[in-house]
Amino acid sequence: MKKTVLALAALAAAHGAFAQSSVTVFGVLDTSVIHAQGSGPNGGSRTQMSSSGNSFSRLGFRGTEDLGGGYGAGFWLEAGLQSDSGGVIPTNVNNQLSGIQASSFGFSRRATVSLFGPFGEVRLGRDYTPTFWNTALFDPFGTGGGIGSNHLYFVGQGGLGAYVGTRASNSVGYFLPANLGGFYGQVMAASGENVDVEGQPNVHDGDYVGARLGFRAAGFDIAGSTGRAQYASGDLTLSNLGVAYTFGPGLAVVGGLKLMAEYHQDKLGQREGRGGLVGLKWPVGPGMVKASYAYYERDALVAGQADLASAKMALGYEYLLSKRTSLYATVARIHNDDGTSDSLGGVPTTPGRPATGTEFGITHVF
């Protein structure tokens, strides 16, 4: 009888623990058709289907467990998808060129386990770097694959092409608690996990440190971040500052209008780059108008030559069919200074000549 009572008690305790846990399956499928056009004798054109024009396509699993006393544990697994082809987004196991793995399915966008409570949150695994958050959150188009996406991220030295421009593997992160009167922030350290042998050069390849601090209150939001990754070919440093203001919903025509701006500075080895962005998101009808202007310049590859610079203008509208499904359209144009050939949609343009593009797509969130 005692054994039966003990077994029932154990089963009830297990059921209670399970009841305090939660697991969610979530995702986004975003597919679009892009027409991009270069110009000049070396310019080309292409119409193609693409993924993540409005929001990143992804599949994820996340969960939390209540540990009692205001403490909890959680996990997050998120895989990047190419919704136009069924492909996956590559990951990087050591934050270096040698660590890129592109052929197999994996949770390349995020793979973390964490403990949280009144102290904040400690998070371990592959996660977003502090500097990425400003680039993503202070641009109306974000950093997806669409033609309107953040110019500083796509052509800057510390953006899409950098191994830690978006995420870092083997990281330990700390996030401030949410009850600090509007202040928020994080710090991160990540390792390249090289073997430390006496006399071995470049043992710190892929090591990263970064931090972000912000303040949010009454429609106003400002955040600054900085990060540094060590590489044998030259260290990467990146700093940015973002600011945004959202007008209250009751303010007639401008109700809900969100204005935003970002300043960006990077350095790869001895080559420096800098730029800025202004933009807006404006609720109009059953959807959202998005617009941005961004300018970026970096040092010439050869000393004494003019800096390489380009500017991008983008305008779009997202039409909400429901809370989960939307249609969107975007037009964009890049103006290149002499010697610069920044393009749209991977279509080449002649140095010093513009590039243009249009995009139509659908986003479904589940």
Image: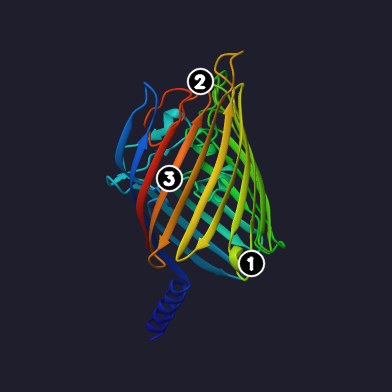
Task: Tell me whether circle 1 and circle 2 mark residues in contact (CB < 8 Å).
Answer: no
Looking at the image, which residue is at 35% across and 48% down? 81
Label disc, if present, on residue 200 of the rendered structure: none
Q: Which residue is mark 2?
A: 339
Q: Which element type, helix, strand or loop, lies under badge 3?
A: strand
Q: Which residue is mark 1?
A: 248
Looking at the image, which residue is at 44% across and 28% down? 97
Mark 3 or 2: the one toward you: 3
Residue type at mark 1: give it: Gly
> Where is 279 relative to 227, above or below?
below
- Lateral position of residue 118 relative to residue 198, left or right: right
- Lateral position of residue 248 relative to residue 329, left or right: right
Residue sticking out furthest to the bottom: 1
Q: Quadrant of the N terminus?
A: bottom left
Q: Residues within 10 Å of mark 1 (few under 14, many from 20)?
A: some
Q: Which residue is mark 3?
A: 331
Residue 350 at x, y percent in the picture: 42, 23
Q: 178 or 30: which is nearer to us? A: 30
Q: Which element type, helix, strand or loop, lies under badge 2?
A: loop
Which of marks 1 and 3 precedes in the sequence? 1
Residue 13 at x, y percent in the picture: 46, 76
State how far apart marks 1 and 2 are (Cα). 44 Å
Q: Quadrant of the C terminus?
A: bottom left
Looking at the image, which residue is at 45% across and 55% down? 317
Which of marks 2 and 1 precedes in the sequence? 1
State how far apart marks 3 and 1 are (Cα). 28 Å
